[in-house]
Image: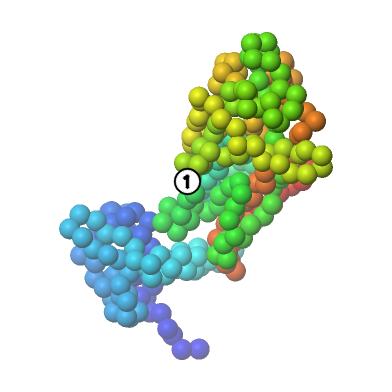
Amino acid sequence: MQRQFGDILLGSIELFCLAAETGGFTSAALAAGVTPAAVSRSISRLEKRLGLRLFVRTTRSVRLTDAGRSYYAQCRQALAQLAEAEREVMGQQALPSGTLRISVPTTYGHHRILPLLPAFRERFPDIRLHVHLSNRNIDFVEEGYDMAVRVRAQPDSTLIARHLEDADLVVVATRKYLRRAGTPRTLDDLAAHECIQFELPSSGRRISWLFKENGKDREVFADSAYSCSDDVLGGVTLAKSSAGLFQTYRFVVEKELADGSLVEVLKPFAGRSRPYTLLYPDGRHVPLRMRVFIDFLMAQRAG
């Protein structure tokens, strides 16, 4: 087998990945303990070898080109595989370690993911966890996340999707609001109520309310003087303050329904849900820390 990658080239690839992750040549140089000029020379060496530009350089910043993002994704995976191969031969394969970076929606994070993490770390104490709580879509390559949980995940051939659960929807309100405004009995009654709205952070579009009516799916585009964006829990807080009705996931308001601070309405029209999916980049190599977390999470959801 002929050598294709010399020591200098492998070092250049490592510096390239550092520059991509830290967002600059100077920051990569600080992380690697070399000079910015050495990083610049390494990047130029790679670009000459590949015959394309990996970064767009300005006087203030550098950013990956489209080709650079693709190359970084492959290089990062290859370097991780090399590191894990070393751990395996050194007898450390049975002890997964490192930092796991996860992006999850706010509601699912608070109610489904964060409560599980102490039990996970009891089992795998050498894994550190960084959880990004946000409803916006993340870029796995540019932002360096290992995996994400999303609702209504769009098909993407570069990602592996694992179904976590179909989260039931429920319409809730306080007794105080219902005494003031009346209890809706039909879906048409919603037109006379404050139906607190949630706007998708990606588009600003208000999401429809989902119901079952006579065995068929029905969408209702209700209206209200109240709307929230980015954090669904804002709508729950408004509903608990007697501002109006709100449709949310049952798992978000289980405690409130149990203690009576919120009540469910329109029960005959329930039965709809939205799917939650675990996403991570496609590739032949998945680091051990990711594999054990995926197995742990899927087992929890199955149980």
214 left or right of 115 in image: right
Q: Position of residue 300 (x, y in %)?
A: 72, 43
Q: Which residue is mark 1?
A: 202
Q: Position of residue 175 (x, y in %)?
A: 68, 13
Tell which of 186 and 153 is nearer to you: 186
Q: Position of residue 107 (x, y in %)?
A: 59, 35
Q: Does 240 appear above or below 97?
A: above
Q: Does 251 appear above or below 75?
A: above
- Per the image, label 1 sits on a secondary structure element best described as loop
Residue at image position (32%, 55%) is 23
Please say whether residue 108 is visible from this viewpoint: no
Which quadrant is home to the C terminus?
A: top right
Residue at image position (42%, 70%) is 71
Badge 1: residue crowd in 10 Å (few <14, some 14–19, many ≥20): few
Tell which of 118 and 58 is nearer to you: 58
Q: Does 284 appear above or below 176?
A: below
239 left or right of 167 in image: left
Residue at image position (43%, 68%) is 70
Q: Residue furthest left?
A: 59
Please say whether residue 209 is visible from this viewpoint: yes
Tell which of 101 and 287 is nearer to you: 101
